[in-house]
Amino acid sequence: MCEVDPHWASVVDYGLITLTKGFNPPPPLNNQMRLYHVDMNPYGHRVMLILEAKKAKYEVYQLDPLHLPEWFREKNPRLKIPVLEIPTDQGDKYLFESVVICDYLDERFPRNPLHSKDPYVKAQDRLLIERFNELIKGSLECFDTNFAFGSEQIIQTLDVFEKELATRGTNYFGGNRPGMLDYMIWPWVERLYLLRCVNEQKFDEKKPIFPNFADWGDQMQLDDVVKKHSRSPAEYFDYYRNARAHSMGYYL
């Protein structure tokens, strides 16, 4: 049985409006950004972490992925989610792709830089973000039907990050505090805990194999930025089960 850890008890109630088919578009922006995303979507979670880390002013609108508003489809024909709407001198503009959005935010708000100033380290971090996609695929395999195959993908990917933390010799990939790489991979690491709901024994057996990564995860859970947007493993489990039932795999 998957029980809610007390750590996750203080989940933020965002009080958000969910936009669905038939809703009119929000009013024009007023000197702040607007994020459109689907609740529980890890890519949107990624952007919210960076917005919070940069202390940016923004508002959030949730979308109903099964019934997107017509005006949103017109502005976003490829149906990319999340979307960051930004005010410009030429009118409000849309930005797509979580990696692009997060890079934009780090450049636009120079306070608390998240990327390394070293071009080589920055490039290595980008490669690690790409490498982490294998863990994302493995997580979905575990939740679907092939736990053995999916868990092997996860283990191989975690081994890369375990060794990287040992090589860097720091608490975080970003050094003495979370950086871009830490926040970019965190949404899926947070969701890894739901796999304990799928197979508790195997999950607990694998955790000690990666002591550096496990310590990193424990420290990330204490980060104020992470805590503001954290959800419980039980909530993720219920959401993923419902999403699969409604063929919403694109938004997982």
Image (cartoon, grey):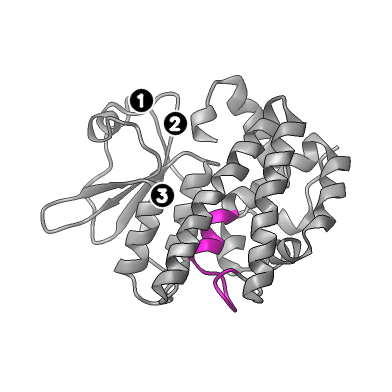
SS at badge 3: helix
**Measured Cα–Cα span from mark 3 to mark 2:** 19 Å
Say whether residue 180 is visible. yes
Residue at 42% from the left image edge and 61% from the top image edge: 51
Specify whether residue 48 is painted magenta.
no
Q: Nearer the viewer, residue 146 or 47?
A: 146
Give the numbered dot on residue 127: none
Report the span colored magenta. 173-186
Res 106 quadrant in image: bottom left
Q: Nearer the viewer, residue 163 or 223?
A: 163
SS at badge 1: loop
- Estimate the x, y position of residue 173 in percent, counting from the top left: 58, 68
The residue indicated by pointer 3 is 98
Q: Nearer the viewer, mark 1 or mark 3?
A: 3
Res 174 quadrant in image: bottom right
Give the numbered dot on residue 21: 1
Residue at 71% from the left image edge and 62% from the top image edge: 213
Mark 3 belongs to which amino acid? Answer: Ser
Mark 1 belongs to which amino acid? Answer: Lys
**Measured Cα–Cα span from mark 1 to mark 3:** 24 Å
Q: Nearer the viewer, residue 153 or 182?
A: 153
Q: Residue furthest left?
A: 90
Res 202 quadrant in image: top right
Give the numbered dot on residue 64: 2
Whether pointer 2 and pointer 1 mark residues with C-beta atoms closer than 8 Å, the reply is: yes
User: In the rendered view of the protein, which quadrant contains the N terminus?
Assistant: top right
Whether pointer 3 and pointer 2 mark residues with C-beta atoms closer than 8 Å, the reply is: no
Dot 1 alpha-carbon crowd within 10 angstroms: few under 14, some 14 to 19, many 20 or more: some
Q: Is residue 216 left or right of residue 59?
A: right
Dot 3 alpha-carbon crowd within 10 angstroms: few under 14, some 14 to 19, many 20 or more: many
Image vertical order of residue 193 relative to residue 124, above or below: above
First in sequence, mark 1 or 3: give its number: 1
